[in-house]
Image (cartoon, rainbow, N blue to C red):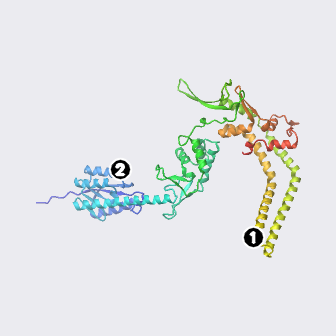
């Protein structure tokens, strides 16, 4: 009588590797497959399919592994070939399910190069033990990692990836890794903060410039706002996240706490960024021409029957002193009137060259006095140096004590520094004055364009520079330009052209002409 032939088992070949720390020393998937193929050939194991996966086994939820388990339940295979039990499971759920399949006689064997686990009590216990050992290793590593992170935080270093503008130092030994400035990105991110703090640019505009003009294509809008809200940039960080535990970092801050608070105020204290229409460019600058009260502004929303929504900004008298008959004016109409005044300040192309030539002629008249001043200052400086040399000789010959030497050396040294600064100031006076005049003239030339293109802060500065005594009456803004722009307006109007040539503005003496340029307006000079 013939013995019953035992049916040949079918196997799934399963190879897994993740990129995490626990798998760095494990063979690659290709190497695992190569070794397991050799094992199957040597043991004459029938492989029905080869499965591979790049995913951690610390928690359940691996897609390929779960599909393999379901197929074993359906009877497509009765065995698994793997490099090691920890390739199959590092968590209690998957380990328990493998043992359960053996209990149900669905999974009969697990083959590894070192050992075969059959459906027997001892083998199942050993399989469970080895997978549990892998889980224990993970748990211990988790504790070690948390302890290391706490130590790093106590030392003042933020754990994890550094924010944009900074770099981690993975090249250093473990325990000595820090965070340093990114030489390429640090100045760019700082410039973004500066642009926002200037008030000339809105937050969305700064991001747009960074992406389109500076090449920061990977800086998404959400990441950009997380950057602006991140306290790391002024030197502090929260760890763990959301715990309320704040730590002072050892990294170099990019901004000050005051600058950070100003940015948060611009963005609405952590809420969505405030639209530019929620702030008003000209409040605090204009008075009512009827009652003298300040002019304020407010937003209005108009909803049409067709569903369209329109936003308007109106300026009107505060009426703090009582009833006032003045009506409100829409901001677009107000800015049209300002632009109309600015249009008068468009010097002819030849004006800039003439003005600079005139200023240079003025300086030539002062050249004699300036040279005399420089000569006298140079003489005093040389005398001071000689005193210092003589003092050293006196100390060397023993004529004065060490205490007297130190006292006199300090006095003469301070005098030497003062005289040196005077020499530099006198020498740089001409260039400084010409540069200031050039800034004023350039500003006047592009003020109209800047008023249209730039932000609210810039428009406020330009209006302030445009003139003083701003009054709003009968929906018309009156601007006194005499003190700031009268020389330019007169030249722009052509009233100072004689025989086709530009002539200096006849406002009095040469001293008065100089004052017209040198003291045009402090707001201009700060540009």
- Name which quarter of the figure residue 288 lies in: top right
Query: Residue 517, image x and y in percent?
Result: 80, 43
Between residue 392 and residue 492, name the one nearer to us. 392
Q: Are marks 2 and 1 in contact (CB under 8 Å)?
A: no
Is residue 118 visible to us here? yes
Between residue 408 and residue 81, name the one nearer to us. 408
Question: Relative to residue 237, is residue 284 depicted above or below?
Answer: above
Quadrant position of the C terminus in the picture: top right
Residue lying at 61% horizontally and 36% vertically, measured from the top left: 279
Question: Relative to residue 122, is residue 494 depicted above or below?
Answer: above
- Relative to 401, 296 lies left or right: left
The residue beneath circle 1 is 403
Choose mark 2 or mark 1, whichever is in front. 1
Q: Residues within 10 Å of mark 2 (few under 14, many from 20)?
A: few
Residue found at the far left of this picture: 1
Question: Mark 2 or 1 closer to N-term?
Answer: 2
Residue lying at 75% horizontally and 43% vertically, measured from the top left: 522
Query: Residue 464, image x and y in percent?
Result: 72, 38
Between residue 396 and residue 521, name the one nearer to us. 396
- Relative to 461, 506 lies left or right: right
Q: Residues within 10 Å of mark 1 (few under 14, many from 20)?
A: few
Query: Residue 398, image x and y in percent?
Result: 79, 76
SS type, badge 1: helix
The residue beneath circle 2 is 63
- Name which quarter of the figure residue 486 lies in: top right
Is residue 214 visible to us here? no
Query: Residue 129, image x and y in percent?
Result: 29, 61
Between residue 135 and residue 66, name the one nearer to us. 135
Residue 311: give its label.
none
- How far apart, in angstroms, are the residues tagged by discs 2 and 1? 85 Å
């Amino acid at each position: 009588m013939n013995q019953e032939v035992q049916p040949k088992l079918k196997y799934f070949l399963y190879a897994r590797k993740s990129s995490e720390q626990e798998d760095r020393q494990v063979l690659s998937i290709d190497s695992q497959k190569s070794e397991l193929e050799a094992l199957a050939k040597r043991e004459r194991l029938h492989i029905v399919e080869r499965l591979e996966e790049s995913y951690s086994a610390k928690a359940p939820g691996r897609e390929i592994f779960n599909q393999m388990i379901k197929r074993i339940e359906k009877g497509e295979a009765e065995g698994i070939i793997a490099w090691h039990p920890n390739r199959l499971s590092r968590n209690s759920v998957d380990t328990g399910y493998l043992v359960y399949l053996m209990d149900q006689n669905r999974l009969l064997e697990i083959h590894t190069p070192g050992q075969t686990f059959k459906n027997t009590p001892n083998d199942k216990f050993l399989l469970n033990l080895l997978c549990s050992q892998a889980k224990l290793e993970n748990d211990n590593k988790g504790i070690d990692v948390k302890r290391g992170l706490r130590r790093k935080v106590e030392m003042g270093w933020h754990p994890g990836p550094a924010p944009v503008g900074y770099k981690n130092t993975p090249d250093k030994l473990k325990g000595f890794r820090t965070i340093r400035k990114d030489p390429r990105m640090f100045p760019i991110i700082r410039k973004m903060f500066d642009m926002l703090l200037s008030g000339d640019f809105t937050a969305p505009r700064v991001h747009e410039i960074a992406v389109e003009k500076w090449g920061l294509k990977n800086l998404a809008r959400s990441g950009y706002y997380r950057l602006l809200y991140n306290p790391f940039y002024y030197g502090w960080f929260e760890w763990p996240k959301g715990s309320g535990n704040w730590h002072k970092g050892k990294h170099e801050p990019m901004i000050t706490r005051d600058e950070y608070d100003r940015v948060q105020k611009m963005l609405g204290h952590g809420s969505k960024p405030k639209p530019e229409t929620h702030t008003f460019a000209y409040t605090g600058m204009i008075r009512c021409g009827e009652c003298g009260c300040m002019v304020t502004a407010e937003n209005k929303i108009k909803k049409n029957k067709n569903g369209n929504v329109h936003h308007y900004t109106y300026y009107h008298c505060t009426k703090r002193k009582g009833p006032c008959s003045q009506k409100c004016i829409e901001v677009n109409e107000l800015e049209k009137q300002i632009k109309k005044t600015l249009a008068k300040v468009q010097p002819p192309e030849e004006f800039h060259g003439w003005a600079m030539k005139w200023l240079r002629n003025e300086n030539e008249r002062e050249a004699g006095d300036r040279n005399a001043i420089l000569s006298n200052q140079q003489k005093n400086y040389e005398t001071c140096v000689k005193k210092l040399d003589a003092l050293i000789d006196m100390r060397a010959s023993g004529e004065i004590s060490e205490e007297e030497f130190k006292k006199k050396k300090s006095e003469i040294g301070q005098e030497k520094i003062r005289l040196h600064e005077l020499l530099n100031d006198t020498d740089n006076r001409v260039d400084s004055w010409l540069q200031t005049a050039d800034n004023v003239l350039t500003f006047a030339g592009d003020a109209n364009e800047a008023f249209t293109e730039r932000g609210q802060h810039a428009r406020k500065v330009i209006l302030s520079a445009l003139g003083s005594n701003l009054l709003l009456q009968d929906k018309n803004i009156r601007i006194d330009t005499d003190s700031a722009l009268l020389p330019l307006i007169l030249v722009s109007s052509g009233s100072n052209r004689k025989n086709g040539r530009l002539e200096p503005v006849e406002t009095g003496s040469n001293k008065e002409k100089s004052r017209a340029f040198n003291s045009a307006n402090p707001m201009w000079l700060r540009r």
